[in-house]
Amino acid sequence: MSKPTTPVLNRRTVFAGAGAVGALAAAATVLPGGAAPVPAKSAGSAPEQGGGYRLTEHVKQYYATART
């Protein structure tokens, strides 16, 4: 009977695999993708005097849950 062979995982095969994965990742970023990302809608106009904090419904809900 022959001895079962086990796959050899040495430093060369690990670095070769890492290089192949890096090349595929670089190629994936260069190739054109599917749909272009849609820019996010602005939440509203900016306040004239700075700031930007608005007491919205979800903020009020957070405050209510934080009190209990």
Image (cartoon, rainbow, N blue to C red):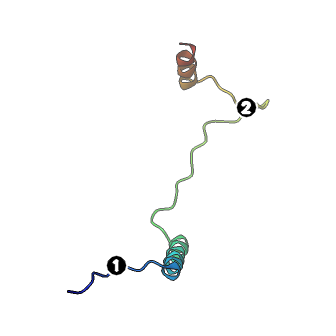
Q: Is residue 30 above or below residue 46?
A: below
Residue displayed at 67% across by 36% down: 45
Q: Secondary structure at mark 1?
A: loop
> Going by the image, does 42 lie left or right of 36?
right
Q: Is residue 16 above or below residue 53?
A: below
- Within 10 Å of disc 1 (Cα), the crowding (few <14, some 14-19, many 20+) is few
Q: Amino acid at mark 2?
A: Pro
Query: What label does residue 26 carry, if any?
Result: none
Q: Is residue 49 above or below residue 10?
A: above
Q: Work out which quarter of the rendered image holds the N terminus and state it.
A: bottom left
Q: Residue furthest front?
A: 1
Query: What label does residue 6 carry, if any?
Result: 1
Q: Which of these two is toward me, 5 or 49? A: 5
Q: Residue furthest right?
A: 49
Among the 4 quarters of the image, the one containing residue 57: top right
Residue displayed at 57% across by 44% down: 41
Residue displayed at 54% across by 74% down: 22
Q: Position of residue 46 (x, y in %)?
A: 70, 35
Q: Is residue 2 above or below residue 21?
A: below
Q: Amino acid at mark 1?
A: Thr
Q: Position of residue 3 (x, y in %)?
A: 27, 83
Q: Which of these two is toward me, 16 or 47? A: 16
Q: Which residue is mark 2?
A: 47
CB under 8 Å between discs 2 and 1: no
